[in-house]
Amino acid sequence: MARVPIERAPVAGRQAELARLDEVLDALSGGLAQLVHLVGEPGIGKTCLLGELLERARARGQLALSGRASEFEHDVPFAVWLDALDQHLRSVASRTLKGLSAAHRRELGAVFAALAVDAEEQDPPLATERYQLHRAIAALLEQLAGEQPLVLALDDLHWADAASMEVVLHLLERPPAAPVLLALAYRPRQLAPGMARALEDLGERGGARLELSPLSWQEAAELLPARLPGDVRKRLYADSGGNPFYLEQLVRAVERGELRHGLGAQLTGDGTVPSAVAAATAREIGVLSRPARLVLEGAAVAGDPFEPELAAAAADITTKRVLAVIDELVDRDLVRPTETLGRFRFRHPILHRAVYEGSRPGWRIGAHARVAAALDERGAPPAVRAHHVERFAQVGDLAAVALLEQAAQGAAGRAPATAARWFQAALELLPDEPEQAEREHQLLLGAAITLGFAGQLADSSEFFHRLLDELPKGPSPLRTAAVRFGALVEHLLGNHEQAEQLVLARLGEIDAESEEAGELRVELAYGGFLAADWEGMRGWAQEALAVERSDPTLQASAHSLLALADYSLGRVDEAKREARTARELVDGLSDPQLATRVESITVLAWAEYCLGELDPSLAHATRGIRISQAFGQAHLIVAQQVVQAMGLLLKGVPGRAADVAQDAIESSQLSGNMLFLTWALTVRCDAALQAGDPRRAVRFGERAQAAAAESRSPWSSVAAPYLAEAWLEAGQPERCLDTLLDARGKPRLPPFPYYAPRCYEMLARAELSLGRQDAAAKRVDAARQAAEEIGLPGPRAVACRAGAELALGRDDRERALAAARSGLELAEQAGLSVEAARCRLLVGRALASEDPRAAASELRRAHTDLAGHGATRHRDQAAAALRKLGRGAARATAAAANGGWAELSEREREVATLVAEGRTNREIAEQLLLSEKTVANHMSRIFRRLDLGSRAELAALVERSRHA
């Protein structure tokens, strides 16, 4: 697509800011990803600086792209990204697609027309998994930056749609592994509160934040014509408050003879344009000829940027007349050509706003209708037309209702916030007629669900209650579904009693022996799990089983819930029997059957995990995720991912566990589910610990603590043990104790028996590291008691290991050896490879003084096992113990096969795989369409992250990772 040069506004002053931008661009040329925040009030010069940044980037040979959000189009999904990338992608689509995975191409093709691929129609994505699109966009940016550094400027983000902002936040959370500069300009006070906090929090992790202040008199003088008298120049500066745009508007007014003295442009400080500036802008528009004014108003309705054809449709004139007038508008600098041939922008968003709001309201409604009709003729998708339709449609317009509903359904998976808005807009247009009641209920349900997935849980709750108020109280599958989902939302808000009352009220409306009553009792039992009410959970699960003629899926759910409740109450034998029954039922059901009650397989996986039945737990968690994805059951996918990641950790696969936990984190963040986010972050913390990165584990643990504090759940204490262990492994036992103990010195134990042995074992190690052996002995006794109460080999192995550590601290080698060997036997019985290797390490240490040869044998085997499972920290402890014996340990790059390998980006893994195939940097660059410098940058990061010293070591690691 041909490009037209953009006229750059002069940059007055801002020397410090320009110098900082030059530093950022130089760092980008060095191959490092960069971030810049430009913040300030309207008209302060953010857009001007972005323009200068882009030109300086181009002068350096960098790829410079930009997009801008628009005040009147903030409901169009991904609008700012489409503005920034879509046209460029049209010119490089075939080359860009070659470097992207099939999954990424599918995601990107749903948003960017230039990257659309010919394929069978895909199932709509799960709203909780829209992070897959965010990752695809990150991969796209990495691909674009492969040949030359990429500068991507996004302006006026305070008006960006929610879907666009989610992508921005993802890129701040996980910056591209390529030389990409993300330059963000926005007005902080006009951002949504939650978005402002997120941008500030993520911005603190790196990048330049440039807060633009008013120009000084010396700086502003560059913008003031020398021909103006000195007193007028000073008055203009004073009345503009040093704001460049306001100053420019006042100068224009003076030069037109509209203002001579008494300008009085007082700044309000709240983002409102001063009255004199607004008046000057209005006069600038007012002097236009009638045809030019009509075209300008049509353009304001068509959008910013706009196409002449749509401006013509809005103005109800021919495109030929519009094109004839646009030259006048360009000459007056009211609009400017964009870099895309045939598209134009308003000089400034303030001008766009003035034109749009200055048009006649009645005419504006008709203009939106004409644009919508023109888009319909083009075959534009519902999401593009919906923005205009909701601005002209009247109550009773069923065609508009249908289009808005269609647009909402299409956006629900990737842009649920926008979908919720369109569902609500359709509701407002629906006539209050009895024959429309069913449609109203469906729209209410759609709004409630999409609000929930958008993280707006309080609003979601309100819509669920509104729906329940309108639905009949008799037999109604829709009412029961609304009760179930509404109760889940209340649980996630921490309103456990309200959730229970909601279900109980529905239970009182129906036949107590009906299958629907059984489903509601299962819902109450599941609510008991979320509220950590084990007696209630058990009681309701038993009542659900008492219902006659219940189908196998309901029975499977009830038995699964009963198994977890029994375990939580210390009835381990009963829990095993219930889990066995549930397993037989679940394994006999088809995927479509399980999709109707996906909590059956989810809770079963949790129960099996707690009971030490890891293989079936992982199998059921994996199947549950597949069913949820295939049948659109998104509400429990995070719980499935969490238990899957926990199982992978116990099986000694921390890299894969970290990947799954990261998916769960991103899903939870997008849905605002603080309880599930807490769980996901604790598992990510644990994976970092096992991979030997305690500093990163501390960061995840602290985030888990923060999320737990917001969850208003009895489960909020689950974060403390993980953060405490992270502090302990980071060499700060005092902080470990402070985190896990209350003011009276009692452990803050989560409301679940699984955690107790681990917490007491950790406390024992902390006390030992501080030299307090008596205190450690008490913690070891508590660990043994907690493990015996559970009665399973896994917890008992942990307690034995704690006893061995204590005995070694007391130099009681014989007792240490006995405890470590008991722990080893129990861990192997439980199938816990990493736990077994840790016990074996203690066996080796206990044998060191009496039988060095046997000790070395045990330590080498422990070293090999720990390395093979990515447990790098414990592997290093084994290596240190061998060095004490004067024995060496082979370098264990296999650790990275499970651990560090997962920390690599997808592009880095591609490069590593090609290295393993014997390719040179040049050959890799040619195959992946990258520069040799970019490949070298990837190689540097790969060697640093995996602690490798040669391409041969990397090739060996890749081979081991395949087997892992």
Image (tube, helix red, strand yellow):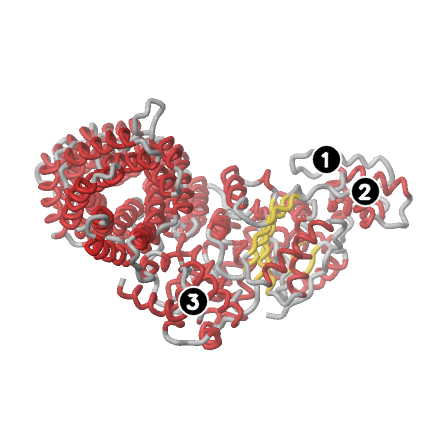
First of labels 1, 3 by sequence position: 3
Type of the residue with mark 3: Leu
Q: Amino acid at mark 2?
A: Trp
Helix or strand or loop: what does disc 3 sit on? loop
Task: Locate the C terminus by quadrant.
Answer: bottom left
Comparing 296 with 124, the one in front is 124
Q: Report if residue 467 is visible in the image.
A: no
**How far across and how far down the image is residue 528, in percent?**
23, 32
Q: Secondary structure at mark 1?
A: loop
Frontmost residue, 40 versus 616: 616
Question: Left or right: where does residue 797 sit relative to residue 234?
Answer: left
Q: Which residue is mark 3?
A: 100
Residue at position x 26%, y 46% from top?
A: 643
Q: Where on the picture, by quarter, is residue 123?
A: bottom left
Tell me how far mark 1 sits from mark 2, CA to CA: 17 Å
Label 2: element kind: helix
Q: Which residue is mark 2?
A: 217
Mark sitting earlier along the chain (3/2): 3
The span from disc 3 to disc 2 (Cα, nearest Å) is 51 Å
Mark 1 sits on what residue? 267
Q: Quadrant of the N terminus?
A: bottom right
Q: Quadrant of residue 544?
A: top left
In the image, 320 versus 550, the foreground residue is 550
Residue 325 in the figure: left or right of residue 885? right
